[in-house]
Image: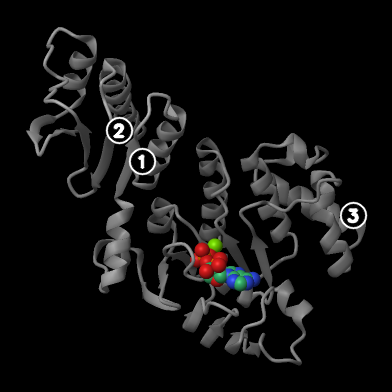
Amino acid sequence: MITIRGLKKEYPNITPLRNVNAEISKGDVISVIGPSGTGKSTLLRCINRLETPTSGDILIDGENVCDKKADLSRLRRKMGMVFQSFNLFGHMSIIENLMCAPMDLLGKSKTQAYERGMELLQTVGLAAKADSFPDELSGGQKQRVAIARALAMEPEILLFDEPTSALDPTMVGEVLSVIKRLADDGMTMLIVTHEMNFAKNVSNRVFYMDEGIIYEDGTPQQIFENPQNEKTRIFIKQLKVLSEIINQKNFDFPAINSRLEVFGRRQMMSQKQIYRMQLVFEEVVLQKLIHKGSIGEIRMDIEHSEREGSVNMIFEYNGEKYDLLGDEEELAVITLKGIAESIEYKYEGKKNHLILSI
Ligand SMILES: Nc1ncnc2c1ncn2[C@@H]1O[C@H](COP(=O)(O)OP(=O)(O)O)[C@@H](O)[C@H]1O
Ligand SMILES: [Mg+2]
């Protein structure tokens, strides 16, 4: 359905895409992953020609998007695009957002556009919001409307650029479940995402981008469990680790708590495990170290071992020897001992190290 050959995109100071080659078949659901700045967004924008590639070919159903004579508006109609930032029209109601392009560009009548729009809102669970305005919707609802609006153009392929990155963690699921349904219905999709859980479970292929190329292309199992190339391995390994440094009393507790939640979800931890992780963080850092007062810098590293289903939480803090689990009677200590499967404490190189496995 899409063939990308020798695709290059250079900007004055940087060449995000050096030589991208790919074959995308009908029904493929491809997650595009990789460190930031590796050209993932640029690739999507070249495919739908929001950007002009420097060189190379992108064939869509045999037709070259890069050809100067290509009928871009017709080619673009084959592709729907969903952005991180929704991009709904604020002055139009939800149903009007869905009706305008089909009427303007597909020549649909008002009734046809309305009926199809309502059907699509039904599909994304938002028929009740047809007459609301974008401002009245949550982020997750807006993104579902954006997906419905892209679908209203009857595209052959949908391109998503980090569709859940701007959302509150509680709203990610509703958007991903809409995308999953489209995948089940056989929609061809290319999805730039940081949701590894989703990439593993929903896509049939994963592109790992780095070095200006599709550095590794494989099934989710190959990429996540047995990556072949060094950079892929490093990237996948990093995904399993979260590090936080706390160096002042008034640190942003909710922000770290929410990063724990996002990390846990991306790691496919159960809600219970995420809660335990947050509880350990709160007890160790807030109840013990911060309240005790004498602490300089605290470093918290979290590693998730999927195979063993365990989470290691490693706390490192400066100062004198202080085993914060010393007082067996204390509530925080009882809580921590109740949650952790194993606890190890050592004092080494003038640093305290506490490792809890939960
Ligand atoms: N319009 C532009 N002009 C100049 N540089 C750009 C432009 N768009 C993107 N870049 C640069 O190209 C690189 C790749 O960007 P992008 O495709 O957004 O990466 P990703 O989506 O993987 O994070 C980045 O270094 C970015 O700064
Ligand atoms: Mg991007």
Is mark 3 in CB contact (under 8 Å) with mark 2? Answer: no
Q: Secondary structure at mark 2?
A: helix
Screen quadrant of the N terminus: bottom right
Q: Earlier in the sequence, mark 3 or mark 2?
A: 3
Residue at (83, 63) in percent of width and height: 102
Task: Relative to 216, say whether 283 is above or below.
Answer: above
Screen quadrant of the C terminus: top left
- The yes-or-no answer for disc 2 within 8 Å of ligand 1 is no
Q: Secondary structure at mark 1?
A: helix
Is mark 1 in CB contact (under 8 Å) with mark 2? Answer: yes
Residue at (31, 68) in percent of width and height: 232
Local packing at callout 2 (Cα closer than 10 Å; few below 14, some 14-19, many 20+) is some
Is mark 1 in CB contact (under 8 Å) with mark 3? Answer: no
- Give me the C-alpha separation between circle 1 and circle 2: 8 Å
Looking at the rendered structure, the kind of residue marked 2 is Gln
Give the image location of residue 295, x and y in percent.
26, 25
Give the image location of residue 75, x and y in percent.
72, 79
Q: Which residue is mark 2?
A: 273
Instruction: Indicate the quadrant of ligand 1 in the picture.
Output: bottom right
Q: Which residue is mark 1?
A: 264
Q: Nearer the viewer, mark 1 or mark 3?
A: 1
Residue at (26, 41) in percent of width and height: 301
Q: Secondary structure at mark 3?
A: helix
Residue 11 lies in what quarter of the image? bottom right
Q: Can you name the residue that lies furthest to the top here? A: 329
- Give me the C-alpha separation between circle 3 and circle 2: 50 Å
Colour treatment of the image: one colour
Residue 8 lies in what quarter of the image? bottom right
Q: Relative to 153, is 163 on the left or the right?
A: left
Q: Earlier in the sequence, mark 1 or mark 3?
A: 3
Looking at the rendered structure, the kind of residue marked 1 is Gly
Which disc is residue 111 wearing? 3
